[in-house]
Image (tube, grey):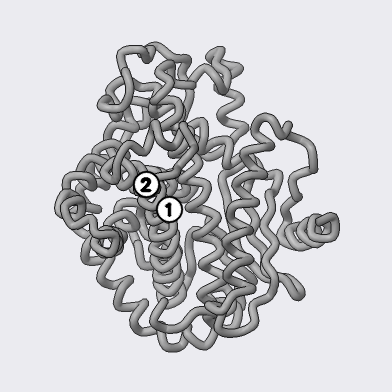
Amino acid sequence: MHNEKKLFAEAVSKLGYKSLPEGIFPLDGFGGILKDAKDREMRRVNRFVNGDGCLRRMKPVILDYIDYPKLNAFAFQYGERNFIAISAPGIALIYYAMYKLLSHPSILEEIGNPELEVDCLPASPLTTDIEVLIQSFYQYGGRFDSYFPKCEQRRRTAYLMATFAVNFIKTHEFRHLQAGHVEFLQDNFGYSGIDELRIFSDRREQAMIQQAFEMDADSFGMRILLSDALRYVQAEDAIDSDMRLVLTDSYRATQLTILSVYIVFKLFHLSMTPSNDWELATHPPPYVRNLMQMANVKTLLEDWNQSDLSDQLQGIIARVITIVEQQLEEAFGVAMDRLSLKVLIDEGPRHGRKIVKTWRNIRDDLSRYSHVSIEHL
């Protein structure tokens, strides 16, 4: 373990980052959240790397945290290892965002008792920079726990949504390694890895390929996350009382999974400089990323014999879009660009089809780099 820590620190230093010092967060608090999330994902990763599903030898994976104030995550290779690096302060920002969202009484008002929530919380922004958040605490007198929902069920829901979001990010990054995205970009474009904050490319072909890779990683992450949630709901021997209180049925599990992932898309997008040319961006807009997952979710629900829930999917999606694209404005005082949303609704499906076409064009070439069969790409 010590050797892995040393290798990770050396690898991220080559990219200009510092690894998170050991023991900086207590294990009975945020440090425990980080450790549990890392251990959970590494069990999944190692099952694949050492299992029959891995078609060709895959370099061992080291996953750890960097001490970087902004939300970020990246997958890359260095030496004889694959690496996944995630900003620890960025994870804290995800938990803050989910807590503050559920502390607003008009958001997901069907969960718990929203009347217990307080409307006049200290002002604080929706931000992807921990230093900006801390500055707002100094300015307006808030603290991290100022935004914990007063209703226990809403507080547990916020915690679970943040956990979902963090699990999605880790699984998304692993997919970039598992499916050969990182090696493909390295061989064809000279990139050493995939950085979620790398925003634009000066080449349309490369940008659209990266958007196709994001679509694939999103699909993989959504499948894993939603399958885990549905499996928990259907398990008769589930013992986690927090999970049982929040995931009351398959409808709630599906709704909270999609909402958590969409908020991840939105938070990463906040770090990016807007562009009118989507075909030069390395990531699709959040609305488009969410839209492209719906066929994937519908198929998954049908595989889980949830055809009734599949029929309700449009309603779930409409509600999630309202929360993320409109109600965030109420909770955080974020001024949403209505014109941009209208453009997304009008142009999003067309851009999504371009991404799918790009994916189909490169799928055969990608299979040479992938550790899974082409049927699973």
Mark 2 or 1, nearer chain start: 1
* Residue at x 33% of width, y 23% of height: 112
Tell me: 160 left or right of 369: left
Q: Is residue 272 above or below residue 111?
A: below
* Residue 172: image location, x then y, percent: 50, 60
Neighbour class for label 1 at 10 Å: few (<14), some, many (≥20)?
Answer: some
Image location of residue 296, percent across then percent down: 30, 63
Count up the numbered dots. 2
SS for tag 2? helix
Between 225 and 218, the residue placed more toward the observer is: 225
Instruction: Verify CB contact (< 8 Å) between mark 2 and mark 1.
Output: no
Left or right: 200 in relation to 143: left
In the image: residue 305, left or right of residue 260: left
The residue singled out by tag 1 in the image is 228
Label 2 packing within 10 angstroms: few (<14), some (14-19), many (20+): many
| Residue at the image position 68 percent from the left and 75 percent from the top | 59
Q: Residue at x 52, y 17 (%)?
A: 146
Amino acid type of the residue that numbered disc 2 sits on in the rendered structure:
Thr
Numbered tag placed on residue 367 in the rendering: none
Q: Left of 3 or right of it: where is 341?
A: left
* Residue tagged 2: 257
